[in-house]
Amino acid sequence: MAALSNRRITGNSLKASWRDIAISLAGTLQAVSLVEQLAKTGYLNTAEMETAVKSLFVTSPQTSLSPYGNISNLLSGLESLEEMLIEYKHTPATDKFRYALGVMHIQKRLSTKRDILGVIANRLNHAAKQAEHFGYLHDNLISNIADIYSDTISKFQYRIQVTGNYHYLQQDRVANQVRTLLLAAIRSSMLWRQLGGSRWQFVFYRSHIIDNCRALIKEAKEQDISGAA
């Protein structure tokens, strides 16, 4: 599956730029931000949740933005990314930053597991048919995707420890949403790697990503205003 594979996107498909890097990282940050919000409050932004779920089914992206639709769909992720990059030299102050780094670690391990990637791809293909029938936010679909995560990613020795309000985390619906969002975050992290992403970029090229992130935030806000007009 192109969306979750270890191949690098090059040639006529995607040509990476710092803008592309910022977009793919924003996809990761937006998904883990929803995890933090959901674990602590029991609520989430349904439009952003739908963006995350849809991204799992874009298996052959023509651009870095293809999995997410419009750039305005990633506004909160871009804002979280800017915040993370500014604070990167320090210990991440929030759970969402810890989740993001954990997701990147898991994605790197997953990229070497062709058998697991195959299982995820096949089961997401089946889930795509379910999405067409029920919609992207239906409990049955979210439960199905959560099971994919539990049967594959959750078997890794390293696991992301989600912290929050126990009252919410013990609810099956919330737990399923959290696992679905983590899989979406891994998908975005995989896209970032395919575009040539590396943790070293946070050290040596942070300013390039921040500049592009800020330009994208401006673009996203203008798109929102234009859409509302």
Image (tube, helix red, strand yellow):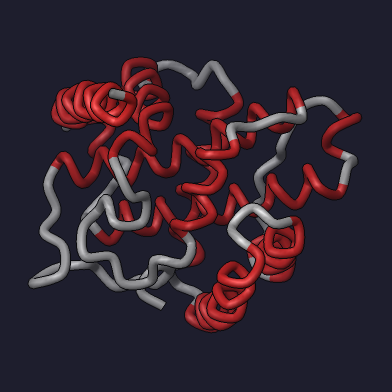
In the image, 166 versus 143, the foreground residue is 143
> Quadrant where the N terminus lies?
bottom left
Outermost residue toward the front in this view: 229
57, above or below 123, in the image: above
107, above or below 77, in the image: below
31, above or below 204, in the image: below
Drawn side of residue 96 relative to residue 143, left or right: left
Drawn side of residue 61 relative to residue 126, left or right: left
Q: Position of residue 176 (x, y in %)?
A: 75, 52
In the image, 188 versus 221, the foreground residue is 221
111, above or below 192, in the image: below
In the image, 43 versus 114, the foreground residue is 43
Which quadrant of the figure has residue 63?
bottom left
* Residue 206 in view: no
Name the residue at 56% across, 83% down: 122
Name the residue at 15% across, 24% down: 211
Name the residue at 44% across, 57% down: 55
Name the residue at 28% across, 39% down: 71
Q: How many marks?
A: 0
Q: Position of residue 149 (x, y in %)?
A: 67, 62
Drawn side of residue 171 relative to residue 29, left or right: right
* Residue 84 in view: yes
Q: Position of residue 111 (x, y in %)?
A: 43, 68
